[in-house]
C-alpha cells in the first residue's frame, strides 16, 4: 500500500467515481462559495466608514468620493450619515451571515449525498465480484469499507475538502478587504499566520500519516472482532470466553480511539495559540497607532476593520488547516475506499436478465482441473464426468476431496484452471455464465435467513411487492414445511429472527429447500443441505423432490449414504479425481464383496 503518494492523485481517483450530477452540483457550490466571499468583503468594507462616522463624522462628510452619494440622498449634515451607515453595516453583516449559513447547508447536504453515492457504489461493486474474490478476503474488510471507511470519507475527505476550498476563497476575499484598509499590516498578519500554519502542517504531517494508517487498520479489526464474538455467541456463552473476546476488541478499539484522538487534537490545537497571537498583534498595532498625531481618531476605524478582519481571518485559517489535517488523517482510509470503488463491474450489470442457456441433454466436465491460487495445490485434477439432464447424482468423499469445489465450478461460481464445462456441447464461459446460472438453485449446509418473514425468506431476493404467494405456499408444501408454518399465528408473515434464530435447524434447512423450489430452477444442488434433518423428515423431503419429475437435475453432497439411496449415480471423489462411480446398490454390494464393513448410515 503506497500511503506516501500525493494526496491529489487520490482525490483525482475519487473525482472519477463522482456522478456527473454531483459534479454539476459541486460546480454550483463553487459559485456559492465565491458569492459568500463577496459578502465577506462587503461586511468588512462596511465597518470602516461606520466606525469613521462614529469617531470623525466631518471627515467622512467632506470626502470627495462620498459627495455624489451625499447629494443623491439629500444629506445636509454629517450626523445624518449615522443612520444610513448603521443600516448598511447591519445589512452587510446579516447578508454575510446568511451566505455563510447557506454555504454550510449546501456543502453539508452535498457531502453526505456524495458519501451515500460512494457507499452504494462500493456495495454494488462488491456484490458483483466473482465468488473467488469473496472467498479470498475477509468480509470484515468489506463491511468496514462500506459502513466505516466510506462514511469516514465524508468526514475526513469530502467535507474538509469543501471547507478547504471555501476557506481559500474566503481568505482571498478577506485579504483583499484588509489590503484596502492597510496593505502593510494586512500582508504582515496574513503572511505571519500563514507561515505558522505551514510550519505546523510540516511538523505534524508524519504523525497524521501514522494516525491514518492506524485508523484504517484498527477500524477493520474492530468490525472483525465484533463479527467473531457475536457470530459465535452460543460457544462464547457456553465456554465463558467473554473476557477473551472483550480483550480482542479492546486491543483493536483502544489504538483506534487513541489515533482518532491524536488526529483530532492535532487538527484543533493550533487555534488557541494563533488567537492569542492575533490579540497581541491588534494590541501592538493599537499602541503604535495611538502614539501618532491624531492617533485615536485615526486608529479606531482601522483597528475596528482589522479586528473584524481578524475575527473572520483566524477561524478561516484554522478551518483551512483543520481541513488539511483531516484529509491527511483520512488518507489511508480513502485509499482503502478507492480500492473498493475501483472494483470492476461485469459486462452484464446494466443488461436485462439473461435468457436461460439451452439445456436439453447433459452437463459434461472435460479434463477439469482447479486450484484456488497459483501457489496452492490442485483441488481437482483432470476430472471427467457426464451428468445427464434429469439425473440424480450423489457425491461422496472425505473432507478436502473437492466435492463442494466441484459443485461451485458446475454452478459457475468458480472458473476452471484447466479444462471445460459444457452444457449440451456449448462451453461455459464468462459471457454465458449468467444464462447458465438461471437454471440453478443452491441449498447449502448453512442456510442464510434474513431477519424478515417466512414468505420473504422463501422468495429470497424478490421485491416484497412481486412475491408470488401461491408459489411460496407450493414450495413450502413440497419442502415438507407448509404444515408447520400454517400452524403458527402469523403463518407466512412470521418473522424468523436474525439468521433464523427463532427456528430449529431442520426448519431452517427446509425453508432453504423451499427457496430453491420457489426459484423453479431445473438444476438443484444440495451441498449437505439435509444434514440437519432427522431421518424421517429427510426421507419425506427427498421423496417430495423425487416426485418433481425427470426434468429436474439434482446434485447432492451428503453425509448419510441413505440420502443418496435414490440417486441414479453416486460419484466418490479422492485425490482430486473420481475414485469410483456406481449406483447405491452397486457400491454397497462391492464393499460387501471385498469384505469391508460399510457405514451405510454415514459417509465422510
Image: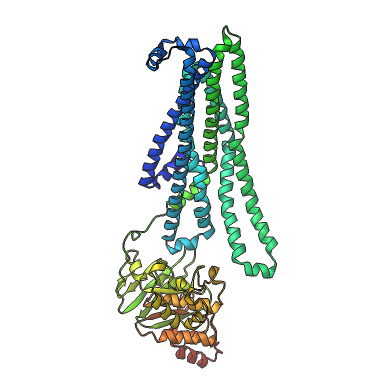
Residue 357 is at least partly visible in this image: yes
| Image-quadrant location for residue 389 | bottom left
Position of 604 relative to 598 (above/below) = above
Closest to the observer: 402 or 483? 483
Q: Position of residue 55 (x, y in %)?
A: 54, 14
> Which residue is rendered at x = 52% and y = 37% of the image?
323
Q: Position of residue 599 (x, y in %)?
A: 55, 87
Q: Is residue 82 left or right of residue 293?
A: left
> Which residue is rendered at x = 61% and y = 64% of the image?
230
Q: Is residue 261 left or right of residue 381?
A: right
The figure's colour scheme reads rainbow
Closest to the observer: 304 or 6? 304
Position of 121 relative to 390 (above/below) = above
- Residue extending furthest toward the top: 293
Q: Is residue 420 left or right of residue 588?
A: left
Q: Position of residue 558 (x, y in %)?
A: 50, 80
> Which residue is rendered at x = 46% and y = 45% of the image?
109
Position of 67 relative to 549 (above/below) = above
Q: Which of the image's four quarters has the C terminus?
A: bottom right
Closest to the observer: 373 or 478? 478
The count of marks equals 0
Q: Position of residue 591 (x, y in %)?
A: 51, 89
Residue 561 is at least partly visible in this image: no
Amino acid at each position: 500500500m503506497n500511503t506516501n503518494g500525493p494526496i491529489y492523485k487520490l482525490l483525482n481517483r475519487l473525482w472519477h467515481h463522482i456522478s456527473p450530477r454531483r459534479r454539476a452540483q459541486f460546480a454550483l457550490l463553487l459559485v456559492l462559495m465565491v458569492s459568500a466571499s463577496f459578502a465577506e468583503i462587503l461586511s468588512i468594507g462596511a465597518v470602516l466608514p461606520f466606525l469613521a462616522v462614529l469617531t470623525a463624522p466631518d471627515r467622512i462628510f467632506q470626502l470627495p468620493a462620498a459627495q455624489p452619494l451625499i447629494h443623491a440622498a439629500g444629506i445636509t449634515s454629517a450626523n445624518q450619515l449615522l443612520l444610513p451607515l448603521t443600516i448598511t453595516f447591519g445589512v452587510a453583516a446579516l447578508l454575510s451571515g446568511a451566505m455563510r449559513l447557506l454555504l454550510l447547508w449546501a456543502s453539508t447536504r452535498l457531502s453526505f449525498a456524495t458519501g451515500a453515492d460512494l457507499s452504494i457504489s462500493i456495495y454494488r461493486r462488491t456484490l458483483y465480484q466473482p465468488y473467488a474474490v469473496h472467498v479470498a478476503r475477509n468480509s470484515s474488510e468489506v463491511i468496514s469499507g462500506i459502513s466505516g471507511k466510506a462514511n469516514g470519507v465524508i468526514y475526513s475527505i469530502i467535507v474538509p475538502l469543501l471547507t478547504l476550498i471555501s476557506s481559500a476563497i474566503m481568505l482571498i476575499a478577506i485579504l483583499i478587504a484588509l489590503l484596502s484598509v492597510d496593505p502593510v499590516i494586512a500582508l504582515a498578519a496574513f503572511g505571519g499566520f500563514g507561515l505558522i500554519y505551514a510550519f505546523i502542517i510540516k511538523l505534524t504531517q508524519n504523525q497524521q500519516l501514522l494516525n491514518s494508517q492506524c485508523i484504517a487498520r484498527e477500524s477493520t479489526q474492530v468490525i472483525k472482532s465484533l463479527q467473531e464474538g457475536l457470530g459465535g455467541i452460543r460457544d462464547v456463552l457456553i465456554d465463558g470466553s467473554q473476557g477473551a473476546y472483550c480483550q480482542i476488541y479492546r486491543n483493536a478499539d483502544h489504538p483506534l480511539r487513541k489515533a482518532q484522538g491524536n488526529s483530532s487534537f492535532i487538527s484543533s490545537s493550533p487555534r488557541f495559540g494563533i488567537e492569542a497571537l492575533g490579540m497581541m498583534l491588534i494590541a501592538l498595532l493599537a499602541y503604535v497607532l495611538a502614539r501618532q498625531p491624531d492617533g485615536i481618531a485615526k486608529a479606531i476605524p482601522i483597528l475596528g476593520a482589522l479586528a473584524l478582519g481578524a475575527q473572520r481571518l483566524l477561524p478561516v485559517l484554522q478551518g483551512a488547516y483543520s481541513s488539511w489535517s483531516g484529509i491527511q488523517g483520512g488518507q489511508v482510509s480513502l485509499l482503502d475506499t478507492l480500492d473498493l470503488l475501483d472494483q470492476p463491474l461485469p459486462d452484464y450489470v446494466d443488461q436485462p436478465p439473461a435468457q436461460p442457456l439451452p439445456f436439453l441433454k447433459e452437463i459434461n466436465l472435460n479434463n477439469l482441473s482447479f486450484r484456488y491460487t497459483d501457489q496452492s495445490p490442485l483441488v481437482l485434477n483432470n476430472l471427467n464426468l457426464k451428468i445427464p439432464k434429469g439425473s440424480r447424482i450423489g457425491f461422496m468423499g472425505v473432507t478436502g476431496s473437492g466435492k463442494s469445489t466441484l459443485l461451485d465450478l458446475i454452478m459457475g461460481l468458480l472458473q476452471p484452471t484447466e479444462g471445460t464445462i459444457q452444457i449440451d456441447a456449448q462451453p461455459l464461459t464468462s459471457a454465458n455464465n449468467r444464462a447458465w446460472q438461471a437454471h440453478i438453485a443452491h441449498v447449502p449446509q448453512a442456510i442464510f435467513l434474513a431477519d424478515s418473514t417466512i414468505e420473504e425468506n422463501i422468495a429470497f431476493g424478490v421485491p416484497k411487492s412481486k412475491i408470488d404467494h401461491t408459489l411460496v405456499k407450493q414450495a413450502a408444501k413440497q419442502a415438507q414445511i407448509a404444515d408447520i408454518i400454517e400452524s403458527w399465528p402469523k403463518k407466512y408473515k412470521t418473522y424468523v429472527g436474525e439468521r433464523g434464530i427463532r427456528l430449529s435447524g431442520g426448519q431452517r434447512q427446509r425453508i432453504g429447500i423451499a427457496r430453491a423450489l420457489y426459484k423453479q430452477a431445473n438444476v438443484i444442488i444440495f451441498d449437505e443441505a439435509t444434514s440437519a434433518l432427522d431421518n424421517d423428515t429427510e426421507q419425506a423431503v427427498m421423496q417430495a423432490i423425487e416426485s418433481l419429475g425427470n426434468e429436474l437435475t439434482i446434485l447432492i453432497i451428503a453425509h448419510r449414504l441413505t440420502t443418496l439411496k435414490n440417486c441414479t449415480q453416486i460419484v466418490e471423489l479422492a485425490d482430486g479425481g473420481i475414485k469410483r462411480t456406481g449406483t447405491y446398490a452397486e457400491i454397497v454390494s462391492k464393499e460387501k464383496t471385498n469384505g469391508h464393513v460399510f457405514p451405510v448410515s454415514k459417509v465422510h
